[in-house]
Amino acid sequence: MHKIIDPKAAPRHLLPAMLYLLHPWSRAFSARPPSMAVAGLICMLFSMHAAFADDMDIVQVKKALELLAPGLKPDSIVAAALPGLYEVTAGSEVVYISKDGRYMLQGDLVDVQTQKNLTETKRATGRLNLVNAIGEDAMIIFSPKKQQVKHTITVFTDVDCAYCRKMHAEIAELNRLGIKVRYLMFPRAGRNSPSYDKAVSVWCAKDRQGAMTRAKATGDIERKSCANPVERHMVLVERLGLTGTPTLVLDDGRILPGYVPAQRLSKVLDENRTSM
């Protein structure tokens, strides 16, 4: 009578031996070349072993995460490019945890041969996902005609920020260059401040684009109140760790802080596209 063994309940180091014992034909064929069918079965079984090992590693990584950040639900846990590490992403945050769950590495992983920052690429993807999750119906958008859009940028802006005003003064030029600008509010003075009230008033105006332009040109805006997404914008600011305005999120998710003249910005966006 054959004894039934559950591979998942067995210690990891015994699994290869179990596979051998569970399949006597593997011993029978050890003295002569196996058939294609048998060779395929052997490959399949050892693939199952590798997958099982990966599952056990992820269990250890999750245990480590629970110790480090109880309740955190990561977006992904995948094997990192560096053997022995797992890449854990949550929003725009990326950390690396050893497969035994003992060590955590926080920093940038760079492929020396390609000169590519693998960590920043993942951060950028997560950052763009967070921004896009806000939805364009919760943004104030200045855009060229749809067929003329070459790039889309998202700008965290403050009505009372001098460099935000300087950037907005070039909004027509940005659109002419094919750049769609999506504004999210970031009143740096914080909640319950005049800047916050202005952000809400711009959103609540009948003509939001006109209100944004007037507020940035003069600093004045008729005070209004309504249901608005400004608080959601502020939560996103905190999650992304932003500190200044204007802050630009490019169409590949990378961050560009501060004012950049329209022509220079267009060149940067074009260069980014060719390098993606």
Image (cartoon, grey):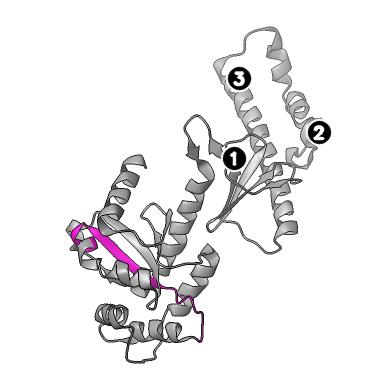
Q: In this view, does 95 lie to the left or right of 21?
A: left
Quadrant position of the C terminus in the picture: top left
Disc 3 marks a residue whose amino acid type is Val
Instruction: Count neighbours of disc 3 (C-alpha within 10 A) and say few if under 14, some if 14 to 19, many if 20 or more.
Output: some
Residue at 52% across, 63% down = 240
Percent position of residue 275, x then y: 35, 40
Residue that badge 2 annotates = 3
Disc 1 marks a residue whose amino acid type is Ala
Q: Nearer the viewer, residue 9 or 168?
A: 168
Hey, which quadrant is residue 67 in on the image?
bottom right
Hey, which quadrant is residue 18 in on the image?
top right
- How far apart marks 1 and 2 lie (CA) works out to 38 Å
Percent position of residue 212, x then y: 30, 79
Q: Nearer the viewer, mark 1 or mark 3?
A: 1
Q: Is residue 159 left or right of residue 12?
A: left
- Please check the rendered image and state whether residue 233 is part of the magenta-colored stretch, yes or no: no
Magenta residues?
Answer: 174-192
Residue that badge 1 annotates = 80
Percent position of residue 49, x then y: 68, 33
Q: Which of marks 2 and 3 is nearer the N terminus?
A: 2
Tag 1 secondary structure: loop
Instruction: Say whether marks 2 and 3 touch (CB < 8 Å).
Output: no
- Please check the rendered image and state whether residue 184 is part of the magenta-colored stretch, yes or no: yes
Q: Nearer the viewer, residue 110 or 158?
A: 158
Residue at 42% across, 78% down = 229
Q: Which of marks 2 and 3 is in front?
A: 3
Residue that badge 3 annotates = 38
- How far apart marks 2 and 3 lie (CA) works out to 22 Å
